[in-house]
Amino acid sequence: MAAIEAEELTRIFQVGGEEVRALDGLTVSLERGSLAAVVGPSGSGKSTLMALLGGLDTPSSGSVSVYDQKLNGMAPVDLAAYRRSTVGFVFQDFFLLSHLTAIENVEVPLKLAQVSRSERRDRANELIELVGLGHRGEHRPQQLSGGERQRVAIARALANRPKLLLADEPTGNLDEKTGMAITEILLNLNKDRDITVLLVTHNPELAKQTEIQFHLGGGKLQKTICS
């Protein structure tokens, strides 16, 4: 069964009076439990696709469904519920709250989902251990390295037990060694937790470790490579 079904997906932006087609009739599908990468040069539509799949933006035309939920025309309150229940996000820039500890950052989406305090703390501790930071859970972001902050961001993305994990350049701000460690965590999530993982990356070595690579160019699907 499909985790993602996007058909003739188009997203048009108006920039300085000019029409820019960030996506131009893109059709892709991805089976549940897959590990895939979206690759392509800057401006190819990678991040726009991620935003549409994550319910952070809406298409100008075409349709997009994730785990049988059609996102087109979904009310803002329903999109927010979709983001809480179905999708986990990992970004290049971490977006951790500086005044909270690592564990408290992981608890944020659980608070939004109105999970009880005791369950929030139990789940956050479990996830901090999962990403290898059990000894750093009470540290704030400024006390952590870049790789540690990204581990916290991954733990936070898993807080509400998502079915789909969207990672946009998750190793982009990390050195090679740290990036490899983060990549291993993401790959293991797909294998061990049966989460569909979709990575946006400029890194060809990272992309090659996935089962499927969607190559975009000019907002269109140029080719699909299955490893």
Image: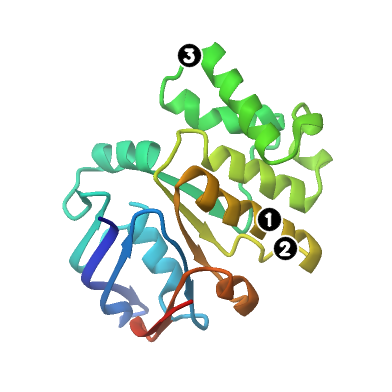
The residue that mark 3 highlights is: 116
Q: Give left or right: position of 58 versus 188.
A: left
Residue annotated with mark 2? 180
Asked if 214 appears above or below 123 in the picture, the reply is below
Of residues 161 and 91, the one nearer the viewer is: 161
Q: Which residue is mark 1?
A: 182
Amino acid type at circle 1 is Ile
| Dot 3 and dot 2 residues touching (CB under 8 Å) | no
Residue 13 occupies which quadrant of the picture? bottom left
Residue at x 60%, y 32% (from the top left corner): 106
Q: Give the position of the N terminus as an image quadrant.
A: bottom left
Task: Specify whether 221 is left or right of 65.
Answer: right
Classify mark 2: helix, strand or loop. Answer: helix
Q: Residues within 10 Å of mark 1 (few under 14, many from 20)?
A: many
Q: Residue at x 21, y 49 (%)?
A: 68
Residue 31 pos. (x, y %): 32, 60
Residue 188: x, y in percent?
Answer: 59, 51
Disc number for residue 207: none
Circle nearer the viewer, 3 or 1: 1
| For residue 50, side relative to residue 152 (left or right) | left
Element type at mark 1:
helix
